[in-house]
Image: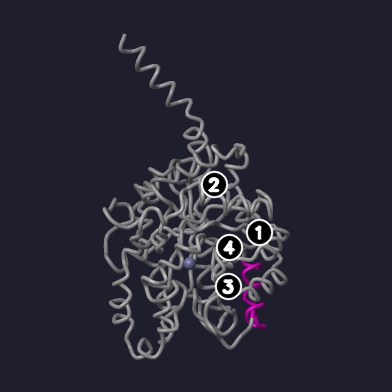
Amino acid sequence: MWWILLLAVWNAAGQDPAARIHRDALVFDAHTHMVNRQLYLGGDIGVRVADGQVDLPRAKEGGLDGMFFTVYVSEQYYPGHFETKQALRLLDLAHSQIRRNADKVAIAYTASDVERISKQGKIAAVLDLEGGFDLSGDLGVLRSLYNLGLRVAQLPAHNWANSFAESCCAAGAVKGLNEQGRAVVKEMNRLGMVINISHASDATIEDVLATSTDPVIATHHGLRSFNDIPRTMSEPLLKKLAAKGGVMGFHMGCEFHSRPFFDFRTRQAGRAFWDTREIGKKEAELTILDIDRLVSKSYPMVGIQAPEELKLTVDDWFKVVDRAIEVAGEDHVALGTDFDGGPTPPRGMRDIRDLPMLTQAMLKRGYSEARIRKFLGGNTLRVLRAVTER
Ligand SMILES: [Zn+2]
């Protein structure tokens, strides 16, 4: 009789609709930090580690099929103008780590590449630059980065000001995009690079939407109606992003979507997480290796220790997504976790392994399978296709 029991268990597993949808859907994370950890702490993206929030084995366990594979140049590299050098070091590391794990991951340049690679059972990695683009907006540097495989990039220098695109979170000389910034947008359109407007100021986002001929994506974001900080997006701006065919990825951190949680984190750290005013003169005197040592202290980047009751539940987290769907429609929301970039995930969620919790929550909220698939990856893939397969 044991086989009847086995069959019952088998059927129960097979019929779990959330597990089935999560397995069948293309799960694509629009913002996951993969190689910064390896630069500072050593190791390999293909090896499971005890700390941190993401590595390839855990991503696979979470059902991930593809990601914007983010290489991140933190602000400390900008005062000494090491930003491009740091981007090159990280891209080199990304290529070597991906090569070393060719059985688990492969670089994707187009949406069709993502589909082909995920069908082979591997994770598709679209190289994505967070900050790190030349502070002067040199188009030759942009083309060189493209030639190194980069297909997604932010315009501002993370939370730092550069000379062509205003950041959300630092006072700079330029408001919105200036002429050079518009030239960068046009060149990204011409090359077929996805423009990431996360970390841009409202004026920059307006200017990008007016200039770009392609849809753009805010890869890891939140709504200002839930947390009024410069790093989140107003609802009218989200509407404009959607009207242009764009997508907003939802950050996994409670600090983005809950004002009480944001205030708690700010009190603990003594500064808002996007505030870079302390960075400047000291860093300008240092070598790049000194800066590596300085930045390495913040790794692994895993969010903060906080009382469980202060954290959002996964259901609360989806209230933000629900509101965005009300404002912009289900074709414009996506997953953009920022794992290993420091989000404090909702209650009960450990790291990228727990992405199936999101599908369970969406099903419980009554999302259709089509809507769930759009959120998990379909929408981001649509933008990637529009930009890379013209
Ligand atoms: Zn970011």
Residue type at numbered disc 3:
Ala
Disc 1 is placed on an element classified as loop
Structural distance between the alpha carbons of marks 3 and 4: 9 Å
Note whether 84 is above or below 30 in the view shown.
Answer: below
Q: Please report the bounds of the magenta region as a residue range.
A: 176-191
Q: Which residue is mark 4?
A: 218
Pointers 3 and 4 in contact (C-beta within 8 Å): no
Q: Which residue is mark 2?
A: 376
Q: Residue at x 41, y 50 (%)?
A: 347
Q: Residues within 10 Å of mark 3 (few under 14, many from 20)?
A: many
Pointers 1 and 4 in contact (C-beta within 8 Å): yes
Say which label, 3 or 1, has the lower sequence index. Answer: 3
Disc 2 is placed on an element classified as helix
Residue type at numbered disc 1:
Gly
Q: Residue at x 55, y 48 (%)?
A: 377
Q: Which residue is mark 1?
A: 246
Q: On the rendered image, what quadrant is the N terminus found in? A: top left
